[in-house]
Amino acid sequence: MAGLSIDKITKRFGETEVLRQVSLDIADGEFVSLVGPSGCGKSTLLRIVAGLETQCAGDIRIGGQSVAGLRAADRNLSMVFQSYALYPHLSVGQNIAVPLRMRRLRGMQRLPVLGRFMPGARALARDIDQEVDRAAQMLEIGHLLHRKPGQLSGGQRQRVALGRALVRDPAAFLLDEPLSNLDAKLRVQTRTEIAELHRRLAATFIYVTHDQVEAMTMSDRIAVMMGGRILQCAAPHVVYDDPDTIEVAEFIGSPKINILPVELDGDGRVSLLDRDLGLVARNAPRGGASLGLRPEALRLASGGDAPLRGHVAHIENLGSELFAQVEVPGLGRRVTLRAAAQQRAALGLGTPVGLSFDRELALLFDASGARLRGITRAAPARVEVA
Amino acid sequence: MVATHPAPPHVAAAPDHVARRHRTAWVLTAPALVLMIVILLAPVVIATALSFSNYSLGNSGFDWVGARNYEKLFTRSTYAKMFIATLTYVATVVPISVGLGLGAALLINTLGRFREVYKTIYFLPVMATLLAMAIAWEFMLHPSIGMINRTLEMGCGTVLERLWPFLSTGCADGFPVWLGDKRYAIWVICFIGIWQGFGFNMVLYLAGLTAVHRELYHAAEIDGAKSGWDRFRLVTWPALGPTTVFVVTISCIRAFQVFDTVEAFWPQGGGPNKSTYVMMFAIFEKGVQQNLIGIGSAITVLFLIFVMFLTLIQRWLVERKVHYG
């Protein structure tokens, strides 16, 4: 096990720059997710760490040692691929044994029939078998060891791929969208298992995914990538509650955060649709800005003090809670609100509703999308005007 | 039971309906069935029947001779030479043309540019008419004016003569009469067969290589397969399993069928001392030239058994060994 450090990695494919000076330090035993939309460079970054691609500039250090010029086989990393990449002609047990056989047995000892009779091969093969068994027990695939990958279900193949990765003791585990080929139910289950596996092994994990739910549920830290850059890297709750940019706020969270166009006056007062919201942004330039409100920050309000009014356009009932999409005249987009299941009666389609929001949870972004911090509530007198 | 519960009318109609469907099915399959019997099965049956006779084309009658034709096949030295020539050819041409085809495919697969150029060059002999090519080869192999012996003569008197005993013997006693010497004739035929056939295997292997999953190579690299040989053993060769079975089978059948070169070089009887008297030529000579339909059919049946055997091995291998499902 070792920490891993990515230092100003740049990668270009021809004219297109897919990674721009990306830096990230990962501590020993940490679980870091690289999350972002497709084409953001997350998989390329992982492949550069693995040594399957070479960077145009920058350096990777594993356990403090630069691995520049070191080929993938010599970096002592394990990787789980999106397609699992199991060898179809080998049984499950043989698949898991490959990394050990390749590293411990010499060329002659690996020969198909003769290899067994080479000096020392038997003892090594016995050790390898024991370690394969141990890995298989850990993943509960002991009964599958003699099957071929073609005879396994997607979930079982995924476990075999994990087994092949953890049979060794690598410096770090790299996982490239390992759950994306599983069905929704299995994905939830495997998510938990991978997170538990990480706790048990206390190993360094780098996990690439486009699914922000996976990133949120499993990681110690999330690195949100977009356009070849890491926009923010922090613990899941920080990324969710305190995003640095509007892109991060929009990418993390489901349903998506509501972004409302607001105006800032010279004093930093925030107004939406010409109504003062009772918020003051210090040191903010005058002009247009964006207000981000998570669905759970909004609540139903009655009477004239509701800053937003509209009618219910669509309801998504999830059983335990429901999400209502409210059409607000003049806003040009729907606002999503999370409501408790009990409020279903009040949210019939077409019902006019008033919405207010929790000012503590309001996120303000400037015109370029950067977060504006230091928002305070305006004097109570002004709120009444609103 | 029947008396107390008379069958309702629609149940009684059911067998009739089933019978009609059966009839329709037979009518629909009839054309294919008839064609298969007439074109494929009947000739086999007729050839098998004729192999037990002494029939000759134009004769009004014939006698059944039992297994005498087969007895001849396994006792006469001509046919012993036929088996030796055929098996030598198959055992030489198949492994080398498959190996070269695979090697060329692997090399071409690593190329970025000029890929198509190389592919075309290696595939040209496959497309060429072997009979025309045989005439070109005949000129090249001519003992005195042929290009090959002329080239070898250029090595006389140089340092090569000391390094290569074959060359020094040739310089002293004259170079081989390639097509007239029983020591060389079969190997010349093998060489031309390989030259002509491996491009086809290469194209099949190139097609097989496109199906190899790229991520498997990355997995192999991560797993510690450092040398090209390790990657070949772990990923490429198993992935090419189905292709290899097909290529080997096709090459075997093609090798058993060798005829054009033998016919072009030695129209009068299968090479010096029958050293290139291959099966297909024997069938042609006995059955067509000498009008001995009986013995010709017997060789044909034997040929069929060889090919059938190969096909069965292929089916078995494909189903059991190389489809990792």
Image (cartoon, coloured by chain):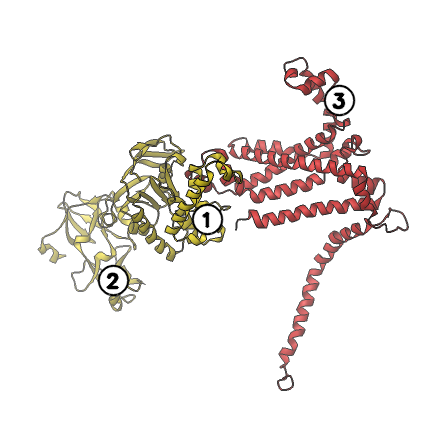
The colour assigned to chain A within the rendered structure: yellow
Residue B138 as seen in the image, left or right of residue A68: right
Marks 2 and 3, how far apart in space? 98 Å
B126, A250: nearer the viewer: B126
Residue B87 appears in view: yes
Viewer-nearest of labels 1 and 2?
1
> Label 3 near label 2: C-beta < 8 Å?
no
Residue A98 as seen in the image, left or right of residue A361: right
Label 2 neighbourhood size at 10 Å, few (<14), some (14-19), many (20+)?
A: many
Q: Which chain letter matches label 3?
A: B
Residues at discs 2 and 3 both on one chain: no
Mark 1: amino acid: Val
Mark 3: amino acid: Pro
Q: Which chain is red?
A: B
* Horizontal and vertical percent position of residue A34: 32, 44
Secondary structure, mark 2, is strand
Q: Please identify the residue farthest to the top as the structure is shown.
A: B157
Secondary structure, mark 1, is helix
Marks 1 and 3, how far apart in space? 60 Å
Label 1 neighbourhood size at 10 Å, few (<14), some (14-19), many (20+)?
A: many
Q: Which residue is mark 2?
A: A339
- Counting the numbered discs, the total is 3
Secondary structure, mark 3, is loop
Residues at discs 1 and 3 both on one chain: no
Q: Which residue is mark 3?
A: B143
Q: Which chain letter matches label 2?
A: A
Residue B89 as seen in the image, left or right of residue A26: right
Residue under the point 18% across and 60% down: A306
Q: Which residue is mark 1?
A: A92
Residue under the point 41% across and 39% down: B222
